[in-house]
Amino acid sequence: MIYVVYAVIVSIAALMGFVLGAINPEGMDPTLFFVVDLPATPVGMVIFGVSTIGVGLGALLLLVAYIADRYDDAAV
């Protein structure tokens, strides 16, 4: 179930990246992980949004899953 929510959130990030890239406001210069400069086009913004949200949220999701697996229900 949580993976469906993760996929939906990453898909929303992709959609918002496409919309922002299509609108192309002034001064938008996305930099992927402070290393790779991306163009402010719809595709560049989709790559930026999906990778940034995907990695950030994915790391938190893996951390929560790891802690939940190690939690001892019998000790409570």
Image (cartoon, rainbow, N blue to C red):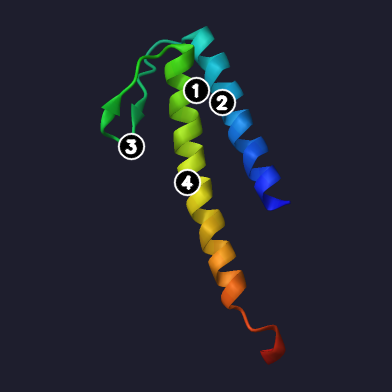
Q: Which residue is mark 2?
A: 14
Instruction: Characterize the local packing of mark 3: few (<14), some (14-19) or many (20 or more) Cα atoms within 10 angstroms.
Output: few
Instruction: Characterize the local packing of mark 4: few (<14), some (14-19) or many (20 or more) Cα atoms within 10 angstroms.
Output: few
- Kind of residue indicated by mark 3: Phe
- The tag on residue 61 is none
- Kind of residue indicated by mark 2: Ala
Query: How far apart are the two marked residues, 2 and 1, measured between alpha carbons?
Result: 5 Å
Q: Which residue is mark 1?
A: 46
Q: Which residue is mark 4?
A: 56
Tags 2 and 1 touching, CB below 8 Å: yes
Depth check: give the residue in front, 65 or 29.
65
Residue 33 place in picture, x, y as percent: 33, 37
Tags 1 and 4 touching, CB below 8 Å: no
Residue pictured at 50% horizontal, 32% vertical: 50
Residue pictured at 66% horizontal, 48% vertical: 3
- The tag on residue 33 is 3
